[in-house]
Image: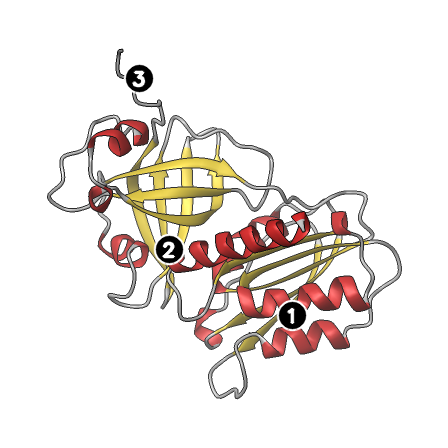
Amino acid sequence: MSTPAPRNRRAKLGVVLRTERVTPHMIRVVLSCDEFVDNGTTDHYVKLLFLQPGVEYPEPLDMGEVREKLPSEHWPTMRTYTVRAWDESTKELTIDFVHHGDEGVAGPWAAAAQPGDKLWFNGPGGAYAPQETAAWHLLVGDESALPAIGAAIEGLPPGAHAKVFVEVEDETEEQKFSGSGEVELTYLHRAGMTGERGDGLVELVEALEFPAGDVQVFVHGEAGFVLRLRKHLFGERCLARDQVSLSGYWRLGKNEDGWQAEKADTARKEREAAGN
């Protein structure tokens, strides 16, 4: 009996062109990439694959072959990042990284990235883009959601109204965005605040007098405040599911591996409960 061939999971390749420190804790990396395919969303994300030092990988990187031939401890570390921008004319892919010193995998990589460095990835995925049919837009998030929020603001239809609430560490982490929409952008600063992360965002949305007409909502970032706003938007505002895009990008106190495992376990329990 013949051995089945490894599944083809060939990753796409980006090559670093340049980097920029957008704010003290946000690093922008611009990659040259001939393989990226725009899916038309503003929250499109990619699965970045960071190679383990000292391990020899096939090139081009094929994750089917990697999983077939290498022990799991030698597999690349995967991290999910939102695409900040894609320029089809120049084939330039822009990704913003939150950087907190030596913490984590992706941030330190971005801080040390040099022109010519390679970055393998899978994707993109994504599901949200501002709709012309919405009467107005509500965008809520923290630093991790800023790339998607920035892309959404710049992707608003001409004259579209949007209220945007973003929590960052302090005024040095604020960013400005261009676009043809009419945007009210409010930044909240964690520095000097008490309470839980995201409290200010939740309070602002709960107190907000919604303008007339159907709203399209985007709430992404730390899972704690996303869950609280999920309950508010569906339970108290009675919004329809297709009006709201929600995603807990990360959870305080967990890396992506731990957070993904927690989400998978929660989903499994929900399926089991539904089956009963």
Residue that numbered label 3 is attached to = 4
At horizontal 38% and vertical 26% (from top left) the residue drawn is: 34
Q: Secondary structure at mark 2?
A: helix
Measured as percent of width and height from the top left, residue 79 is found at 37, 49
Work out whether residue 35 can be spotted.
Answer: yes
Measured as percent of width and height from the top left, residue 96 is found at 41, 53
Q: Which mark is residue 228?
A: 1
Q: Amino acid at mark 3?
A: Pro
Q: Which mark is residue 257?
A: 2
Q: Which mark is residue 172?
A: none
Mark in the foreground, 1 or 3 = 3
- Taking depth in this image into account, of 150 and 176 the one nearest to the observer is 150
Measured as percent of width and height from the top left, residue 177 is found at 56, 56
| Upstream in sequence: badge 2 or badge 1 | 1
Q: Name, please, the residue furthest toward the left.
A: 54
- The reply to whether the C-beta atoms of the residues labelled 2 and 3 are less than 8 Å apart is no
Q: Secondary structure at mark 3?
A: loop
